[in-house]
Amino acid sequence: MVQAWAGVGEAPAELERWASFMLHCDRLHGLAQEQGMAEVELALAPLLHLLGDIAEPADAAYLPANRLLPAIAEAVRTAYDGGGKRVRTGSPAQRAATASPGVLVLSGDEAATEDLLLQMEHYGYRVQREPDPQRGLAAAAAQRPLAVIVDLSQGFERAAPIVAELARLGLPWCALARQGDYRLRLQAVRQGALFFFVAPLSIDALVEVLDPLAYPQQEPPYRVLLLDDSRTVLASVRQALRPYPQLHLGVLSRPERVLDVLNYYWPDVLLLDYHLRDCTGLEVARIIRQHKAFESIPIIYLTSESREAMQQEAMRYGGDDFLVKPVGAEQLFHTVLHRARRYRGLRKLMVEDSLTGLYNHVKTKSLLQQSLAQAERQKVPLSYAILDIDHFKRVNDDYGHATGDKVIKALARYLRQHLRDADIVGRYGGEEFVVVLQNCQPEQARRRIDSLREGFGRLYHAYEDGIFSTTFSAGIAHYPGCAGMTELMAAADAALYAAKRAGRNQVRVAGMAG
């Protein structure tokens, strides 16, 4: 970013230099969000706003931007001097320090909820049962719980006044009944029920409904890269997309740099002018599609040409959509948003484990490699842990594979909730999980993984005839104690097997006694 800014200083009137600097600013902003550096995000905000308003770069824009850089540099230094301990609002570490979200159950059926009152606390929720509807509504108004569960077992008509009052209070509610017949479900849906539970309440089902309410995931803006050598077009597209915060626009005017920019900007959509100065957009698209990493990025052509034959040719060689200039701001926004959303969804399926939603084996290894490179650049430690659920074959044999899947999902959720946003959690396969702890010394990693082990051991998992608990073993290795990824993974694996040989339900660190 510093080097790019020096380039702007050499020629403030060149759009290409500003575009390069903007991409670096966006990358720093993304890292700040990813690692919970709120101070850096705050310091970057005025600069990003200023850059977004630049239509024609010149000396007049250089000086105000230059005055903002010292504050950003100071924020970065402060963040890293803090040892990576700062977390942003809503991160798992901060959520753990605040009161657990409350859930109110309006039901006289004690048997349907008695297990929940104890178990939901281990999942990060407080559950209160109130058999009297009026006292329940008073509690709902006073406590403002995350959600209210209303028992409809005696018919919707008796519960209708309760549901109406919850709607007036603006509180989300879920239905509970002994049987889930269609008519009752339809009545509940018509009155705004988020979900319909069939008694007895399942912890797994309840947690899946509550988690998005308690810990909503903020989707980062879709990244759009515009390649066009016309300053007028660059300025007009920037102006058209400015009202839409869902999209973040990067601009590029030199086609020969497109592969380099794609390598670090990784857009969700590429807007490509068909007629460029020394080549065509079609030729650029064919170059892009020759690289496997970029073969699925959506390409939308922008052109003043309306000939059908040319459009067909463009689509034949790597195009996904075609917009004829001039294009309205709303049409441009919806076309780009549709393509970006679909691409990100497909990409998500490619990197996520289908059962747990964690990173899959391939993506986890890729992120570990990136994390090691970052740790080497920043001269900071990194710890790598492999977790394995103890006696998991016995769980499948005794309670069934469906229950085994629930145990795997429970551990995935527990890890996600109790680790920092900057840490990486992946499912390595079967009952094995991987955790990458950024900027973390071996002893610190051991304490954190051991705390997770103890907490997970206190969870209970339901099966047809009752409940049971289970544990996990873990092995940890660290960088720079291990020089590279292969050595790191092998050392953690050896430590895991040492933990298993010593009796399981424990954590071992490579190179440390005990």
Image: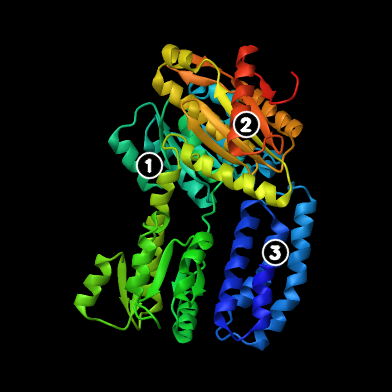
In front: mark 2 or mark 1? Answer: 2
**Judging from the image, what secondary structure is the residue with disc 2 in?**
strand
Q: How many marks?
A: 3
The residue singled out by tag 2 in the image is 385
The residue sitting at 60% across, 16% down in the picture is 500
Is 316 rendered above or below residue 187?
Answer: below
Is 321 rendered above or below residue 108?
Answer: below
State the separation of the CA atoms marked 3 and 1.
Answer: 43 Å
Quarter-wise, where is residue 465 in the image?
A: top left
State the separation of the CA atoms marked 2 and 1.
Answer: 45 Å
- Residue type at tag 3: Leu
Q: Residues within 10 Å of mark 1 (few under 14, many from 20)?
A: many
Farthest-out residue, left: 309
Q: Residues within 10 Å of mark 2 (few under 14, many from 20)?
A: many
Whole-percent x and y of residue 360?
A: 47, 38
- Residue type at tag 2: Ala
The residue singled out by tag 1 in the image is 188
The residue sitting at 63% across, 44% down in the picture is 372
**Judging from the image, what secondary structure is the residue with disc 1 in?**
helix
The residue sitting at 57% across, 44% down in the picture is 369
> With 112 as the anchor, is 311 left or right in this view?
left
> With 87 as the anchor, is 146 left or right in this view?
left
Disc number at residue 509? none
The residue singled out by tag 3 in the image is 42
Is 5 rendered above or below residue 406?
Answer: below
Quarter placement of the N terminus = bottom right
Is 64 rendered above or below residue 196?
Answer: below
